Every structure is written in structure tokens, then in C-alpha cells.
Image: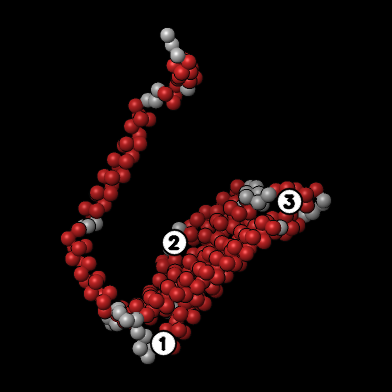
Amino acid sequence: MTGPHEVDARQLRARYPDIFDRPASARLAMPAMIFAAFAILIYGLVDLDFSPSRFVAGLSQLGWISLMMIPPDPGSSLPIYLKALGETLSIALLGTTLAAVFALPVSLLAARNVVPSSLLRFPVRRVLDSIRGVDTLIWALVWINVVGLGPFAGVLAIAVSDFGAFGKLFSEAIESADQKQVEGIRASGGSPLHEIRFGLLPQVLPVIAGQVLYFIESNTRSATIIGIVGAGGIGLQLAEQIRVLEWQKVSFLILMILIAVAAIDFVSGKLRFAIIGRRAVA
């Protein structure tokens, strides 16, 4: 005698044959992908000359360097380091602000609900993709050769790199905005500029502000890295002290960077929470 569950199973199997009777290619796809990923991993480790013995031997060297870093000591260079840290923070703040200011109008041209024509929107998006595809460190090397060593090159590197990222993020925020406000302004006789000014921007500006605050925090670390290649700031001091093996000064500089990043993260987190909370209340 056939039970109700067997009847239901047969009915489901007949109704959804693609799920119950999957072809062999579909069943083997996931194991094949896992095997391929594992094979690529093994090949990469062999090709890059990964050696567990060298790694274990290097741990002793790492331990020796860590001992040499204790205690952190700036020596007589504390004023220089504080000035360099302020320079790094200025690079991050100015570069991020410039990128956001220039990316906002361009992001309007990349948004589908502002520029419906793909003939106009497509080249703008591709330009943003091209700029975003080049790392900040590469932009720093480029601008160092254009304007010379120093923090000005760092500001330009962060501004150009973030311009591409902000253009994409801002355009996505604009595309996800509620169109009811825009339609209401249009129905009341507003121009396209009025639709953008009073319909779109009030919705997306809190999101944009949160993204800019996050990037300021992230760019503090980026400004440190590009400083190592000559773009000024505390990264340049860090590279010099590593070069002369002044490990106590190195640990002090690292501690300064960690404290600065933690403080910026705390402040930007509070500001983002306040902005989001105000938007939710509104």
C-alpha cells in the first residue's frame, strides 16, 4: 500500500524534475570547482616558492625584532613625529574631501535615474572604473613624478583614487533613492534640476556623508602607506627608521598610527550613527 508521503514525493518529482533528477554535470559542478580551487592554491604555493621551513626559521627573526621594539621610544624626535602624523591626517582628510566634492556631480551623470541614455552614462561609468582600477599606491608613484615628493602628491593620489570609488558608490546611492519624491516635484512643475536638488539629494546626502566618513578613516592607513614611497607624512618617517633599524622608534610610530586610526574610527562611527539616526527619525 502506498503512503501519502510517497505519493507527495512522486508528485513533486514529476512537477520539478530538474531538482530531483539533476544531470551529472550539475551534480559534479561543485566538487569540480572545489578541486580546481584547491589545485590552483597548491600550484600558487609551489610557484611562489612557499616554504614552511623558511617560514618557521623566520619566526625566530620576527621574535628578535619584536624584542628590539620594546619599549617604544621616540628619542628626541617626538615633535617631528607629531608633525608627520598631522601631515598624514591632513593628506587623508583633504584627499577624501576633494574626491567627494568632484565625484558628486559626476556620479549624477553615472546614475540611471538621472541620465537614462546609456550613450551618455556608459563612458562616465567606464572612466570611473578605469580610475578605480588603479591602486592608490600606483597613483602616488605617478603624482610623485608629476609634482615631486611631499604631501601634495599624497593628497592628489588619494583624491584621484577615491574619485573613482566615490563616483560608483554615489551613483548607486542615487539610483536606489525613492522616486516618489522626484515624481511629486515633477508633477508640481519642477525642472530636472529641482528634481535633483529637492528630490534626490536630500535622500542620498546622509548615505554619502557616512561613506565619506568611512573613507577618511580608511585613507588614514592609505596615507601612511603612500608616505613610504615619498608622499610625506608619518609613513616616510616609518620607512626611514626601518631602513636604519631603529626598532624602538618604529614601534613608537606604529603605536601612534594605531592610536590615530582608533580615534578616527571612534569619532567617525559616532558621526555615522548620528547621521543614520537622524535620517531614520526624519
Left or right of 254 in this view: 45:
left
Q: Residues within 10 Å of mark 3 (few under 14, many from 20)?
A: some
The answer to whether any part of residue 26 appears in the image is yes
Q: Which residue is mark 1?
A: 78
Q: Which residue is mark 3?
A: 182
Give amino acid for label 2: Val
Distance in Å between CA atoms under marks 2 and 1: 35 Å
Distance in Å between CA atoms under marks 2 and 3: 35 Å
Left or right of 108 in this view: 247:
left
Q: Which quadrant of the figure contains the N terminus?
A: top left
Of helix, strand and loop, which one carries label 1? helix
Q: Residues within 10 Å of mark 1 (few under 14, many from 20)?
A: some
The answer to whether any part of residue 115 appears in the image is no
Q: Position of residue 41 (x, y in %)?
A: 28, 49
Q: Position of residue 103 (x, y in %)?
A: 59, 63
Give amino acid for label 1: Leu
User: In front of the other: label 2 or label 3?
Assistant: 3
Q: Is residue 54 above or below residue 181?
A: below
Q: Which residue is mark 2?
A: 134
Q: Which quadrant of the figure contains the C terminus?
A: bottom right
Q: Residue at x 46, y 80 (%)?
A: 85
Q: Earlier in the sequence, mark 2 or mark 3?
A: 2
Of helix, strand and loop, which one carries label 3? helix
Of helix, strand and loop, which one carries label 2? loop
**Residue 200 or 191: which is nearer the viewer?**
200
Q: In the rendered structure, are the residues bearing label 3 and label 1 in contact, judged by CB atoms less than 8 Å apart?
A: no
Q: Position of residue 154 (x, y in %)?
A: 47, 74
Q: Earlier in the sequence, mark 3 or mark 1?
A: 1
Q: Is residue 183 above or below residue 282?
A: above
